[in-house]
Image: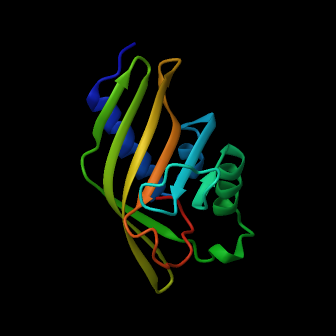
């Protein structure tokens, strides 16, 4: 099976819509079991292991995050945080057999109660075609001002 550029781009749009709508279980199902979500601390950071990152989560940690966000006893999420992604049309940077790399610039807004934060960021998705289905192998989110002090990010840009 071949994947078109439009299918890759639609996948990215579908992913952010799931997050905006709070469909975290559907979002989690997009991931490969060994997927990694990385948010570097430094501009052009190359190493998530030996350098501090804002976030570096494997599937175990992503599942815990989703359980917390879905939990009825998560009092820090009463009322729940909400988010909104405004994305530019994603670029398809690499096509290598059943592996693909996309790059998407976006504005991400997260709000809860009377607090709102706006982040400008770029997301790189490493995607894989597995049994005819696109899956996320890795996601890297570079916040434009990652070296600034900001509030906790509760959801996932």
Total marks placed: 0
Rendered residue at 29%/24% (across/down): 4
x, y percent for residue 98: 44, 19
Q: Furthest-left residue in view?
A: 89
Rendered residue at 44%/66% (across/down): 83
Q: Furthest-right residue in view?
A: 73
Q: Nearer the viewer, residue 16 or 94?
A: 94
x, y percent for residue 52: 61, 61
x, y percent for residue 126: 46, 36
| Left or right: 50 in relation to 126 | right
Which of the 4 image quarters holds residue 143? bottom left
| Left or right: 120 in relation to 125 | left
Rendered residue at 46%/59% (across/down): 157
Please determine whether, in this image, residue 122 is positioned above or below residue 54. Answer: above
| Left or right: 126 in relation to 153 | left
- Colour scheme in the image? rainbow
Rendered residue at 40%/29% (across/down): 100
Which of the 4 image quarters holds residue 55? bottom right
x, y percent for residue 24: 57, 52
Please identify the quadrant where the N terminus is shown: top left
| Left or right: 75 in relation to 26 | right
């Amino acid at each position: 099976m071949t994947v078109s550029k439009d299918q890759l781009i639609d996948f990215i749009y579908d992913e952010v819509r799931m997050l905006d709508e709070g469909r975290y279980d559907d979002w989690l199902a997009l991931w490969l079991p060994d997927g990694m979500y990385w948010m570097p601390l430094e501009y052009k950071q190359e190493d998530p292991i030996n350098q501090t990152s804002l976030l570096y989560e494997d599937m175990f940690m992503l599942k815990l995050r989703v359980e917390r966000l879905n939990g009825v006893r998560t009092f820090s999420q009463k009322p729940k945080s909400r988010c909104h992604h405004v994305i530019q049309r994603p670029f398809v940077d690499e096509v290598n057999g059943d592996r693909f790399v996309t790059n998407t610039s976006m504005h991400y807004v997260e709000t809860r109660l009377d607090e709102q934060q706006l982040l400008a960021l770029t997301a790189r998705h490493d995607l894989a075609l597995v049994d005819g289905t696109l899956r996320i192998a890795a996601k890297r989110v570079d916040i434009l001002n990652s070296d600034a002090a900001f509030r906790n990010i509760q959801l996932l840009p």
